[in-house]
Amino acid sequence: FYTISVFQSLLCGLEQRFPALSKEKRAEKEARKRKPPYILKRQMDLANPRRPYILRRFINLHIQ
């Protein structure tokens, strides 16, 4: 399982190669704002995920 920093640097490299990814990420942030309120806002902060399942959901979104 990747550490968060490795995962983020991987994403940055991907974004440089595919500029569309940053658009996807922006769209994903918008979608995350519309998520049901039972997920705490601080848990949605990808730089500092408090729960591992949030990160897992994020990884699954990008693999699909």
Image (spheres, helix red, strand yellow):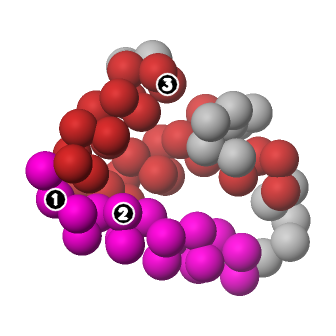
- Above or below: residue 8 compared with residue 32: above
Q: Nearer the viewer, mark 1 or mark 3?
A: 1
**Residue 18 tag number:** 1
Count of numbered tags: 3
Instruction: Return the x and y of residue 63 as percentages of the image width and height.
Output: 24, 53
The type of residue carrying mark 1 is: Phe
Q: Quadrant of residue 3?
A: top left
Chief SS of the magenta region: helix
* Secondary element type, mark 2: helix
Residue under the point 37% across and 72% down: 23
Q: Amino acid at mark 2?
A: Ser
Neighbourhood count class around disc 2 (C-alpha, 10 Å): few under 14, some 14–19, many 20 upward: some
Q: Nearer the viewer, residue 27 or 17?
A: 17
Magenta range is 17-34
Regarding residue 30, the answer to whether it shows in the image is yes
Asked which secondary structure carries label 3, the reply is helix
How many angstroms separate mark 2 from mark 1 (CA)?
A: 8 Å
Q: Is residue 60 left or right of residue 48?
A: left
Left of 14 or right of it: where is 3?
Answer: right
- Note whether 63 is above or below 13 in the view shown: below
| Residue furthest to the left | 17
Point out the image quarter for the C terminus: bottom left
Q: Is residue 27 magenta?
A: yes
Instruction: Residue 13: name its quadrant.
Output: top left
